[in-house]
Image: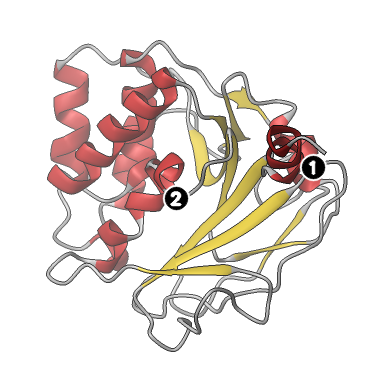
Amino acid sequence: MNAAIVQLEDAMHAAVITAIYDRYDVLKPTCPQVGARVEWICVTDDPGLDRGDSDPLGWRIVFEPRPGLHPNRAAKHPKMRPHLYTTAPSSVWVDASFRVLSAGFVVDVLGFADPIAQFVHPWRECLFTEAEVSAPLPKYADEPCLEQAARYRAEGHPPRWGLWATGVIARRHDDLVAVWGQTWLNENLNHSFQDQISHPHVCRTHGLRPAALPGNHLTNPWLRYEGSARH
């Protein structure tokens, strides 16, 4: 068989990517997929997960400690720039708090990605409200949630423009999505790491609006939430 054909047949169609820093979550098993060649990638600072090329649960482990960077910010690198961790043309980011249950998950959610798809936030529709709810939470102590939202308001972001849960993101790796991801990462490195505050602003300024995945991140056909006690 022609070598180029073999290489094409062996190429991954998509990647499922997650991250665990500061042992915030427990790594769940992968779920074999149908209809696409899928690689599973976990980026971590935990040497206990770094067992060489792969993990017994089916993941390829990328050991990438980022000393001096808050773990919540360290985990944003693969979340917002997944194309740097795979050669696949598409990916699905899944927070490590979720267990994938469906063999059709990757094909299904990427079918909505034009070029990105996410669950709509189940309770709120505005980044300004999200900032008000987030600011008092212990997780975001010392994070400038309200100041960040005030800056977006001053820059013209409209109320109730939309709000999305960011624990699951299906995307096509085109140039616009790559620029959008880098801008979103910069917001999290330079302002608060509550990425659901910055997400709508960055989407709007890049002319993107995520397609809505059916259901929500807590009730859907593909995933089960199993967050740790630290959530």
> Is residue 106 in sight in this rendering?
yes
> Is residue 214 in sight in this rendering?
no
Q: Is the residue marked by circle 2 packed among few (<14), some (14-19), or many (20+) residues within 10 Å?
A: some
Q: Give the SS element for disc 2.
A: loop
Q: In the image, is 184 to the left or to the right of 34?
A: left
| Residue 50: x %, y % from top left | 45, 81
| Residue 167: x %, y % from top left | 53, 50
**Which quadrant holds residue 156?**
top left
Front-most of 177 and 120?
Answer: 177
Front-most of 77 and 61?
Answer: 61
At label 2, the amino acid type is: Tyr
Q: Is the residue marked by circle 1 packed among few (<14), some (14-19), or many (20+) residues within 10 Å?
A: some
> What quarter of the picture does the N terminus occupy?
top right
Query: Which of pointers 2 and 1 lies earlier in the amino acid sequence?
Result: 1
The residue pinned by badge 2 equals: 85
Q: Is residue 155 above or below residue 152?
A: above
Query: Which mark is on residue 125?
Result: none
Residue drawn where x is 50% and y is 75% of the image: 25
- Here the colouring is secondary structure
Q: Is residue 160 above or below residue 38?
A: above
Q: Give the SS element for disc 1.
A: loop
Q: Is residue 101 above or below residue 198?
A: below
The residue pinned by badge 1 equals: 36
Residue drawn where x is 39% and y is 44% of the image: 84
At label 1, the amino acid type is: Ala
CB-based contact (under 8 Å), mark 2 and mark 1: no
Front-most of 199 and 80?
Answer: 80
Q: In the image, is 7 to the left or to the right of 130?
A: right
Residue drawn where x is 68% and y is 71% of the image: 58
Q: CA distance from mark 2 to mark 1?
A: 18 Å
| Residue 114: x %, y % from top left | 61, 18
